[in-house]
Image (tube, rainbow, N blue to C red):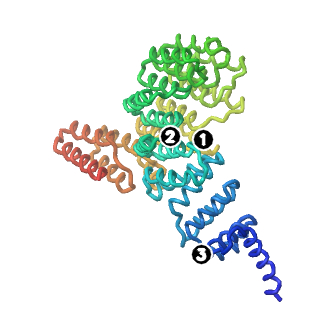
Amino acid sequence: MFLSFCLPKRSTLIGRAFHIGKQFSNPNTEDIFFRAICVYLKQRRWKLLEQMSPSLTNSLVCRVIHEFRNSSHLALEFYNWIGEKKRFSHSLESCCTVIQLLVNSRRFDDALAIMGNLICESGVPPLEVLEGLINSYEGCDSSPAVFDALVRACTQFGATDGAYEVIKKLRMEGVWVTIHAWNNFLGHLLKLNEIDRFWKVYKEIISYGYIENVYTFNLVVLALCKECRLLEAISAFYRMLKNEIWPNIVTFNMIIDGACKMGDLELSLKLMRKMEVMSGGSVQPNSVTYNCVINGFCKIGSVALAEELLNEMAKVGIESNERTYATLIDGYARGGSLDEAFKLCNEMVERGLIPNTVVYNTVIHWLYKEGDMEGASFLLSDMIDKYICPDQFTYSILAKGLCRNGYVTEALKLNNQLMEKKLIADAFPHNILINYMFRNKNLAGAKQLLGSMFVHGLMPDLVTYGSLIDGYCKEGNVEGAVQVYDGMIKVEENLTW
């Protein structure tokens, strides 16, 4: 009875699959499976698809994905479902087919995730991924956006040289690399602080006859500001206007921030006040603009002027945020006005803003510096009670604060607890403790801390080795300093290999 109930349904489904495939006069086995899979996938009949999974081949998977090119959600669902099968491994062809489909559907994040998986987890070189995309390009009716996406994936997942190789290969193949791909690569170089390489690539772009857009100019302005070449950044701004490219808020904010970092607060204020006129009425200051100038005034100790700007923000209808208050709180605390800093903390809460880790770190740091151990401990407890997670800076502040106030033993105990819970991710807290060990002429303690780092998988950095070498030299133990140096060289060589 059960079989008679089920078979008609199944035969109907298979019949429908044959009906869809009528263009095949003598359909082969793969054609039959292909049509059946398409029917089952549309209906999300995963149990029936499961029964067919042993017969799946990469060519069949590619055909199914291509068939659902106008239903990217179903194609991706099928791709992911296949990827979960232990007995099936996606080929480069199937991966590239689904990437083309996702880019065509403007599902760039999903496409980037698959590219990242290919490059990082599967270890496929970017040039091989490019070859796969070129081979599947025409069959998928794709667009050059897929190559832009590959460059972005390379930069996003740290394959800097791979990104450049992809760009060069595309040019060799006669494919026009868009300005968007170049901009992405230039931006990545700036994030890595590779300024010299940035300028080489920028000159290369200009030599190819590309027309810069607002994003290219913004990157040029940022590079110049990073090198403190403020006048040249302003010159690039006027070159934008000459080329009839209107600067956006990012352009202005970068120049204003550059002026603030160079201590030219007068220029930064002028730019902020004249922003609307200089942009033809298209750009107005935002919270980032005000935060830059407020930070500039706080850095030179003019916190009262910075607070005036906070009040101005409220008047013109620009909402202050956690960063605004964190900057002002640090400014007051740095100047020794902790009472004013606490007032701003209360004002912040009254405005519905929750003090974040940066705010807590700032106040705890200055409380320790003033020797207020009780106040620092209270704030730390309050931070934990409010589920605001301490970060690596918090742990370093605690280590330094306790040591500075003579609680070295407590600092070591805290460090051990954090290590056991695997909460310390870098060498910074250890560097502080090692430094204090040498100050207290506790050479054995410093050695023990260094050993603890290796045991817990933390690599000493240059500061760690520098502290050890300096400590040994001050002790008159030149031989010990040389041994530390030799150990550092060996570690570097092992890392290189």
Question: Would you say 28 lies left or right of 477 here?
Answer: right
The secondary structure type at the circle numbered 2 is helix
- Three-letter amino acid code at disc 2? Thr
Q: Considering depth in this image, is 169 or 45 the residue closer to the camera?
A: 169
Q: Is residue 458 visible?
A: yes
> Disc 1, disc 2: CB below 8 Å?
yes
On the image, the x and y values in percent for residue 40 come to 72, 69
Name the residue rendered at 45%, 48% in the picture.
425
Against 327, residue 459 (above or below) is below
Whole-angstrom CA distance, mark 1 to mark 2, is 11 Å
Which numbered disc covers residue 81?
A: none
Residue where numbered disc 1 is placed? 383
On the image, the x and y values in percent for residue 166 come to 44, 44
Mark toward the viewer: 1 or 3: 3
On the image, the x and y values in percent for residue 429 come to 41, 43
Characterize the local packing of mark 1: few (<14), some (14-19) or many (20 or more) Cα atoms within 10 angstroms.
some
* Mark 3 or 2, nearer chain start: 3
- Three-letter amino acid code at disc 1? Met
Residue where numbered disc 2 is placed? 394
* Mark 1 or 3, nearer chain start: 3
Residue where numbered disc 3 is placed? 55
Against 443, residue 354 (above or below) is above
Q: Is residue 429 visible?
A: no
- Three-letter amino acid code at disc 3? Ser
The secondary structure type at the circle numbered 1 is helix
